Amino acid sequence: MTAEPLPRADVIESTNPATGAALPPVPMSTPSEVADTIARARAAQAGWAALPLEERIQAVKALVRRMLERQDEATTVMSGETGRGKTECMMSELASIDAFGKMAISAAREALAPHKVNLPKLEYPGKRAVVELVPRGVVAIIAPWNYPLGNFFKSLMPALLSGNAVVLKPSEHTPRTAVWLKEQCDRVFPRDLVGLVQGDGRVGQLLLEGAVDAVVFTGSVRTGKKVSALAGERLIPCSVELGGKDAAIVLADCDLDRTVAGIGYWALHNAGQNCAAIERVYVEEAIADTFVKRLGRLMEHLQVSTGEGLSDLGPLQNRQQLDIVRRHVQEAVAQGAVTVCGGEPTGHGLGYRPTLLDRCTQAMTVVSEETFGPVLAVVRVKNAEEAVRLANDSAYGLNGSVWTRDIERGEALARRLEVGVALVNNHALTGIMPEMPWTGVKDTGPGVASSKYAYHTFARPRTVFIDSGKDPDPWWFPVNPDLDALGHALIDRSLGSFMATFRLLGLLKKRVAAIRKLAN
Ligand code: TXE
């Protein structure tokens, strides 16, 4: 599988999704630039890996500080290419970076600590072993457009803390935030340690076909499968986080105000362009009317960005995404869903009104396929059992939540959800907590982001085994009756025979003498 040739001197052109204003074009990387970026990152990596972890930690802290000090630059560039208001960009991608960095550092200390193995003294005299974590080399991070800064952070920090170099590949829809991020990295890390390539899928594929040693991919299921296959061919570790179709289960005994507010937020945060957005809600019939009425009222109040002033949510980031949202809503309505609010574009840029669809069914695409937009489908259910069954009837499994005042019951139900992150009375918020694995099942992909469990992608275990070299091992040649007796003594000892230990000690000495004699 080879990438299609890139057109010459291509540039990425895009507009502000809220206003339609043209943004400065960004040059696409040529194949030789991709190769050169990987090579330079590799050259920078050796020195970086040789630094003690504490020095790498200081550099990551400096990066965090530098970014926070330049918050206005960051939110300006993010807001320009996502169309979201600056406040939303700050809250969702910048304000938590310090806490994120601290937790990432503590996860790194735990994950990267060498592990001394305790070997039994009788069987393995004079031997010791340690398992150390060694960086992979150059890690490619291929990101989508929904969080142009945050999507990188999840992997950039652990990759660098592990001693790797990194090559960033942003989405062709949001190339500019990555340029800013690379500039910040260049100020605190050794030159070329963090590389950047720009372009669409063809550039992503070139990067994978190049000499990278591991890949972290976030994006669609279709591309995630291609990336996994290519990584498989190259035998490099690959962590994929693909789509989601998260369900929330709302039980009749929930705190209704809080539940409406929480579900409204996690359905519409970032205009629903979040892999862990609540896209389906299963509500017990007993409270469905009230729940739908209140949530509809909340959604009606929310302001979609027009590019000016404060807004609750941004537009869709790109035209294709708007088309998906329109199609899912139109199909659902044609199949009998009731539009409680929204259901149409705002008329400003790529804005779409927050949309609540009631009386949806499992058969509708808005319930089965990832919508990735400001749309929430309500499915009314008889009881919690039906809710769990329908929630699990999905190709995806990222987050799932149960909203109830009965915490014990909620916890038991949440554990039955086929997801990577199960929650009670909240949703999606662990995505910015690097001490907890962010992972999924089914088409969401098996990748693990965050926590010590994510480090397989960033560091390989290396076993270092040291034998003091005093005596030869008793099972070396020759095979003689003493070896047979030694085997029996070992087994008898395992079965609890105290006397076998004495037999063993005598046999070990005899075996060592026989082995030395044969080799003499
Ligand atoms: O994703 P792609 P797109 C879902 C959402 C959306 C759909 C498509 O449903 O509608 O995916 O979005 C790079 N080798 N999510 O088209 O194509 C590409 O350039 C290597 C869910 O943006 O998967 C970009 O940098 N790389 C998701 C990145 O992969 C390749 C967030 C993602 O692009 C490549 C976003 C290739 N062959 C969309 N082809 C989530 N899980 O959060 C493309 N790329």
Image (cartoon, helix red, strand yellow):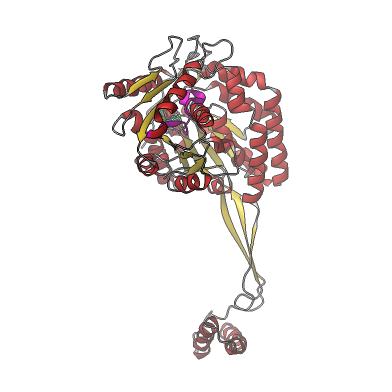
Residue drawn at point x = 28 percent, y = 33 percent:
363
- Reply above or below: 315 against 497: above
Q: Quadrant of ligand 1?
A: top left
Q: Nearer the viewer, residue 305 or 9?
A: 305
Q: Is residue 49 left or right of residue 420?
A: right
- Residue 39 visible to an observer of this rendering: no
Residue drawn at point x = 58 percent, y = 14 percent:
310
- Reply above or below: 248 against 24: below
Task: Check if residue 243 falls in the magenta segment.
Answer: no
Instruction: Give the percent coordinates (x, y) of residue 38.
Output: 54, 35
Number of marks drawn: 0
Instruction: Give the percent coordinates (x, y) of residue 35.
Output: 51, 33
Q: Which residues are magenta?
A: 267-285
Q: Nearer the viewer, residue 516 or 288?
A: 288
Task: Check if residue 272 falls in the magenta segment.
Answer: yes
Question: Dividing the image into 4 quarters, which one contains the N terminus?
Answer: top left
Residue drawn at point x = 34 percent, y = 41 percent:
393
Question: Dividing the image into 4 quarters, which one contains the C terminus?
Answer: bottom right
- Residue 206 visible to an observer of this rendering: yes
- Reply above or below: 219 against 87: below
Residue drawn at point x = 46 percent, y = 24 percent:
295
Instruction: Give the percent coordinates (x, y) of residue 326.
Output: 35, 19
Residue that protrudes farthest toward the left in the picture:
335
Instruction: Give the percent coordinates (x, y) of residue 53.
Output: 69, 46
- Reply above or below: 134 against 377: below
Q: Nearer the viewer, residue 11 or 285?
A: 285
Quadrant housing residue 316: top left
Q: Is residue 63 left or right of residue 455?
A: right
Q: Nearer the viewer, residue 306 or 362?
A: 362
